[in-house]
Amino acid sequence: MRLCSFAVLSSLILQITASSWSPRDAVETTQLSKRALLQDIVTWDANSLFIHGKRVVIYGGEFHPFRLPVPSLWLDIFQKMRSMGYNAASVYWDWALLEGQQGDYSASGVFDVGLFLDLAKQAGMYIIARPGPYINAEVSGGGFPGWLQRNPAHLRTNETGFLEATYNYINNIGKTISDAQITNGGAVILFQPENEYLNGFATGFSPNVYYVQDVEDEWRNTGIVMPYTDNYGHDHFLPGSGIGAIDLYGSDSYPQGFSCNDPYNWLSSDVQTNEYQMFEIESNSTPPMIPEFQGGSFDPWGGAGFGNCSVLTNEDFEKVFYKNNFASALKIVSYYMTFGGTNWGNLGYPLGYTSYDYGAAITENRELTRAKYSEAKLIANFWQASPAYLTASPEKAQSAAIYTTQANLTVTPVIDSNSETGFYVIRHDGPEGTTNYKLNLPTSKGIIQIPQIQGSLTLVAKDSKIHLADYAIGSYNVLYSSAEIFTQQNYSKYSVAVFYGGLTETHELAFSGAPNATIVSGSGVTVSEIDGATILNWQTSSSRKVVQIGSDLYVYLIDRNSAYNYWVTYLPGTDSDPFGTFSTSQPVVINGGYLIRNTTLSGSSLYVTGDLNTTTTIEVIGAPSSLSCLYFNGVLVNTITGTAPTLSGQVIYNVPYINLPSLASLNWKSIDSLPELSSSYDDSLWTAAVLTYTNNTYRPNLTTPNSLYASDYGYNTGTLLFRGHFTATGSENGTVELGLAGGEAFSSSVWLNSTFIGSYNGVADASSANVSYGLPSLTTGDSYVVNVIIDQTGFEESQTQGADIMKAPRGILSYNVSGYAPSAVSWKLTGNLHGEAYEDRARGPLNEGGMFAERQGYHLPSPPSSNWTSSSPLTGTSGPGVAFYSSSLDLALPAGYDVPLYFGFPGASNTSNYRCQLFVNGWQFGKYGKSFGPYFQMLPFDSRR
Ligand SMILES: *[C@@H]1O[C@H](CO)[C@@H](O)[C@H](O)[C@H]1NC(C)=O
Ligand SMILES: *[C@@H]1O[C@H](CO)[C@@H](O)[C@H](O)[C@H]1NC(C)=O
Ligand SMILES: *[C@@H]1O[C@H](CO)[C@@H](O)[C@H](O)[C@H]1NC(C)=O
Ligand SMILES: *[C@@H]1O[C@H](CO)[C@@H](O)[C@H](O)[C@H]1NC(C)=O
Ligand SMILES: *[C@@H]1O[C@H](CO)[C@@H](O)[C@H](O)[C@H]1NC(C)=O
């Protein structure tokens, strides 16, 4: 036995020993697609994509860098995705954040596109790049920068003015993305120009193939050579269809919709059983693809909250719907979202709140606490470990019929015509109940009714399973299995396969050729031989059974919850491996608790990195070479070897001492953030509203003498302030009427000089409102100022072509001060400091709004607060107004732990109307509006030291 030495992972120079490729990783030579391609690394046929000539399933999830503004955490998310069996991330970028001022593309720091792509490569995650220019994505303007409001061209059309506006963004980000294409050694394998282009057309507009072609050409001109995908799901842009054609056809699918109010109320009969057939009608020469499949749900103001959305799309939803995607033979699929993140710094759209958790597999604070993460991992790993699937296609789904006598079960056979492997996706269609059944399974030995030995199979409502026939594991043939496979891996000396089932379920597994079966550990497995096959029959329990088949296959029979602790990672490829960090040729299978991030091998020492939340035994059950030493996070583990080829040892988890400061007991300082009410306030530096016209195509006709659209003056984000000056000509008790626009759930307050005259609290579904407030008596000859604050909620998305809804203005649409001609009032306005020439390059163009405290930069670290009043936000203001509170705190988190933190305001008062926004070190973490519910949370901390 080799002596294990202590080493720290980070100081090691990794020398990876080459080991032979397992059969399923052998490079498959195949006829490339006949379509002329710009490169030959990523190709396809009707079954699947090929990368470097090898068939691959692209199985991934959506992750937006801009919703996690902490580059050091991007790798964390990529690793969590790769470790769940995903090999690709689909990624939007938000133009509005990268070109806040027209002509000034800025992508450094938290906006660094190249770094994000480098980290994807480091984690071995392929990238499906979707940079727009339009992305929708529940972001302000659907990704369109505010300055487009002034562009007289229609959005998303081939009008020159619009196309020209896209050039700077496309040229810049296109260059960065093209540098990171797989052809240049990077992660990018597919590219989607535009997004959801066909969601609607205003009168006079129709699908503009010229526009789509123009955008495609623009991207190509920046060096993008990867195949184009679409998610338009429409025959205007089919592969080979001419102008605007894409390469790989796909269509998004959200079968449960977006209402999280009643999350348990869904039927597996909502499952589409003809997805594959529909796909074949549209595009039978490309691999079946769903570029966005439901991975969660967005949630509107006052919605049920993301906890409910995660239930709507929970592990049961995944079992039924993700396995139905398997039944649809999808070879390219991405789940939207897999990590949602946060709408920090005003980047969200008006219909949603700060959190963009999405109920996704990875929570907003990056935790893996939802069972849907683990369940998705089981499904993804099976998908990746089943090479026969790559060339399989489904037959028609059968209700009961030939496979079973139980009418409430549906079976979709997915058959690989090359290997004759059969995947039988069986689903329980009822809303509740448990169905016991026997399955008449077609195998190479004819139709066999399983289980043969004892018991029956069971399927509960909202569950689905993939039963197998003639499935190869190493040199063995699984004649059939009712238990599902998490993974199976083949090494030069042995093979390993992990089967799982629900607790108490009976399962049966049969091997052709009657190989010997030896129980290595555990009990309760009946071994029989029938018709030249070795049959294992057992009842699933939490105690593991390991059976050796023949001389070199180790079969693990476990329950679902135990399987949640198993991980497959891949050693980075050697120099001769064209796949590099994306390689899957050297898998390592580990039973190891909360998270295994990655593994590297040095000689016979395996270095494992991961996260624990309790004392855990790390057990390696499959590795490309024999191991003598195991390190976890750089520390040598005391190990024992098992009867089966395993190496395991316990890693102690020391519960960290975490003492978060109480926000209530901090030393808070406060300052009035509405000095505009003071009679001495000087607004001479404010922008005068002098434009007598607007180019806004959404609302081209002004109903005020001068435009009061904030974007006409370059204010595109956050709070807006307007001051209307007039001189009283009488003492009448009149009214002021205002037509205000701020996006859904916006709010506003109005003062005459320092006298509060009214507030509008907003409603979740109105983006504008007309308000009328009584005026106090005026003194003839005196000057007055109508002070208007608008808490706006961002720009609308722009789904309907030609309607240009993104241009719906924010500001004052109309006004009337009774007794005065409109021209008697002259207006000034302000928003974020310097508008589109935004000051804060680190935090981007949208982070700051127009509140006094924001314009002064008091939200930045170390505000000059020593002379401010001592007052706590928990006390609040005594009447209408705006107060800014500041304090500092030391988190003092222990080193070596990843401590996900968020701000929550569960006890926020619902009895008075208020709005608040929270800044931490200058970053706007979120906004809260009373009665618009779910409280915000924001988590861009990297607590790891
Ligand atoms: C722009 O699109 C329209 C269809 O909306 C088409 O008729 C026209 O030819 C296109 N112009 C150019 C320059 O491609
Ligand atoms: C550790 O995390 C897993 C997965 O989220 C969870 O099921 C388990 O309860 C956690 N254990 C502890 C001790 O927190
Ligand atoms: C499924 O069918 C069986 C037999 O008809 C029945 O006993 C069972 O209640 C059904 N379950 C549901 C959920 O419909
Ligand atoms: C099966 O087991 C028997 C008894 O242990 C042994 O004699 C025989 O060689 C084994 N056969 C194979 C193929 O391993
Ligand atoms: C493994 O993960 C650790 C922790 O994130 C990271 O520092 C290291 O670079 C990773 N190693 C490889 C080979 O990806």
Image (spheres, rainbow, N blue to C red):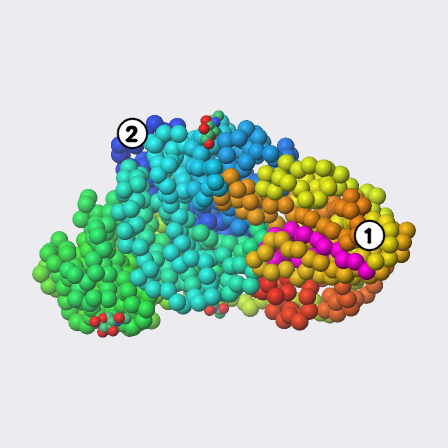
**Dot 2 corresponds to which residue?**
34
Residue 614 at x, y = what percent?
Answer: 49, 67
Q: Which one is in front, 90 or 480?
A: 90
Q: Is residue 599 left or right of residue 282?
A: right
Residue 226 at x, y = what percent?
Answer: 42, 34
In the image, what residue occupies the spot 55% across and 36% down? 154
Q: In the rendered view of the protein, which quadrant contains the C terminus?
A: bottom right
Distance from mark 1 CB to nearest ligand 1 atom below 8 Å: no
Residue furthest left in the image = 531
Q: In this view, does 876 lie to the left or right of 896?
A: right
Which label sits in the foreground, 1 or 2? Answer: 1
In the image, what residue occupies the spot 57% across and 51% down? 349
Instruction: Examine the image and state in which quarter residue 273 appears.
Output: bottom left
Residue 68 at x, y = what percent?
Answer: 56, 51
In the image, what residue occupies the spot 36% across and 29% down? 242
Specify start and end residues of the magenta stretch as a single range. Answer: 733-749
In the image, what residue occupies the spot 64% across and 40% down? 701
Residue 733 in view of the camera:
yes
Secondary structure beneath disc 2?
Answer: loop
**Dot 1 corresponds to which residue?**
785
Labels in figure, total = 2
In this picture, is 815 found above or below 889?
above
Q: Which one is in front, 349 or 713?
A: 713
Q: Of the residues under marks 1 and 2, which one precedes in the sequence?
A: 2
Alpha carbon distance from label 1 to label 2: 71 Å
The amino acid marked with disc number 1 is: Val
The amino acid marked with disc number 2 is: Lys
Q: In this view, does 177 lie to the left or right of 916?
A: left
Residue 582 in view of the camera:
no
Instruction: Examine the image and state in which quarter residue 869 appears.
Output: bottom right
Secondary structure beneath disc 1?
Answer: strand
